[in-house]
Amino acid sequence: MTLLYTIFARNLRTSLKHLAHTNVRSCSTTIHRSPYPDIEIPNQTTTQFIWSQSAKWDDLPAVTCGVSGRSYTYGVMKMLSSRGAKALLEKVKLKPGNRVGLILPNLPEYPVVVYAAMKAGLVVTFANPLSTTEEITRQFRNAEVQCIMTIPMLLEAALTVARALPNYAATINIGGETDLEKNVLGMQTIFTEEFQVELPEVKSTDIAILPYSSGTTGLPKGVMLSHRNLVANLIQCSYSALTNVKHPTPCSQETVLSVLPFFHIYGFNGILNFLMCHGVHIVTLPRFTPEDYLRCLAEYKPTTIFVVPSLLLFLATHAEVTAKDLSSIRRVICGAAPATKNLIDKFKQKLNHADCTVEQGYGMTETSPVVLYTPQETPVSKMGTCGRLLPSTEARLISLIDGSDITLPHNPGELLIRGPQLMQGYLNDRSSTENSIDVHGWLHTGDVTYYDEDGYFFIVDRTKELIKVKGNQVSPTELEGIILEVTGVADVAVIGVPDTMAGELPKAFIVKHPGAIVTPEIINDYITPKVAPYKKLAGGITFIEAIPRNPSGKVLRNQLKVFGK
């Protein structure tokens, strides 16, 4: 009887949780809650949480460079980050709360220096190494950076930036020599010394990192994420219904291949920190080239790959990628932007084996980053979804017209989010913070979403990217998905171009596969029967060599608007 009661009670709780995602109302507010149990967040910093179980796999590889083969074990990485923390305080003379800036591609040393800074109580901000010195200077001045960490190839650019920073301490040269005349310290030298300084007590509520928002809508802003924010999201993403990552054993260790940049929040907390928590062997590349990526697939035989839609498109459509190259892959995790059903179908056709899942998620820099994720048992009928709300996460949808709550499934509206992964605010920008997070703690994402009866969410587009045609709203993502169905199309982006009569008109920028015959007439003939008249490409079609994207794979539509004039 006791066993039957326990099973009944558990099933009842699960059913009530499942119903709760659409039925919680307060006055005129409809709050969607995660169907999963709330999490408990330990009072730990990011590094304390990551290293809490690592003693079990100290001798196993942590991060390997897919180009050079250079690699660190978990034990060596932990030792170097501890020594590095003391070096930053004693040798560089930094103090807890000071900011350090990274100008680095993906390297095995990336987590070493970040975790060293965190253990020292420092705040880390990341720069895209492809940014100009002017862009990095603007970011680092705003963040009040006092120490830059970089590599010899980028040292001169780093020194140019350093000269513009007040109260600057030193530049750390990873893989390079010390040059005291230029105030440059070699990482290998100072991180292997044993300093006796006592490490500070870092609180879980302290700011850990200052990533800058992508800047696709306005100037980039420093996003203040605490250790608690990062740890909360790591625990949320580790919930058993959402992931099947296995901790290593003496006989096996999972290998993951990812080229997505660690200087982006998706790459840093969503990939690097998450995989380090679980003892995974991470193979990464400083930059993407088809040759290096395919060689890593063959050499390391990863079971999981992290991608963005543009990389998934490459794997699905590029002639050099074969089913044999993809034979070890059992799990594909796609983020940064929605992957369409058509794209997923193309990839699975290339894969040529059924034992692989394509999982999607949704998040923002401001949410550490993950908010939605597809469960392990997501039905095929839900293909294209970005998943369900993570544990301890709440959502609302509001009308794009009057801001009222949307109370029924399949009605798109702006997504609002609340949860422990939500940022502390924008650095030195109270106005932007208050414009993004309302008095009730809801983050207004600017993304258009709808949900279905089972609590699965689908991303439609960004509110600021919707094309307004004679009062009608056109989703660029919808048109892009249709155009990608045309044989010979390798990539596409759609924007709105100004029009005196209509306000805006949809215009497509298309990349063709080499040798493919694709004309505007072919595109228009394919689209016309599939869309309403106001969605047709009346703004024109332009063929270009490549779609401009930021490091996370998002289309830089502002650049295309310049091309479209």
Image: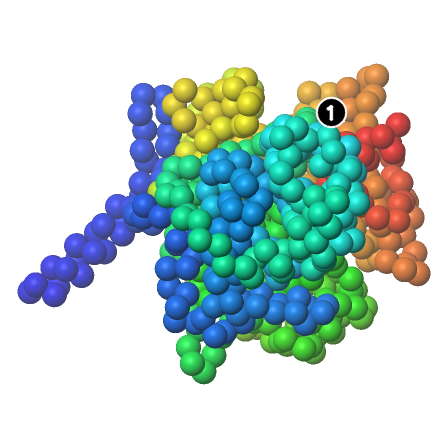
Q: Which residue is mark 1?
A: 469
Image location of residue 393, percent across then percent down: 39, 40
Q: Nearer the viewer, residue 227 or 160?
A: 160
In the foreground, 495 or 93: 93
Looking at the picture, which amino acid does disc 1 mark?
Val
Viewer-proximal residue, 313 or 478?
Answer: 313
| Picture coordinates of residue 214, whole percent (x, y) | 65, 37
Q: Residue at x 75, y 44 (%)?
A: 181
Residue 436 percent across, percent down from the top left: 52, 25
- Asked if residue 497 lies left or right of residue 9, the reply is right
Occupied quadrant, residue 55: bottom left
Q: Secondary structure at mark 1?
A: strand
Q: Quadrant location of the C terminus?
A: top right
Q: Residue furthest bottom?
A: 251
Q: Where's the N terminus, which quadrant?
A: bottom left
Residue 504 can be seen in this image = yes
Q: Nearer the viewer, residue 197 or 277?
A: 197
Q: Do we see residue 105 in this rendering? A: no
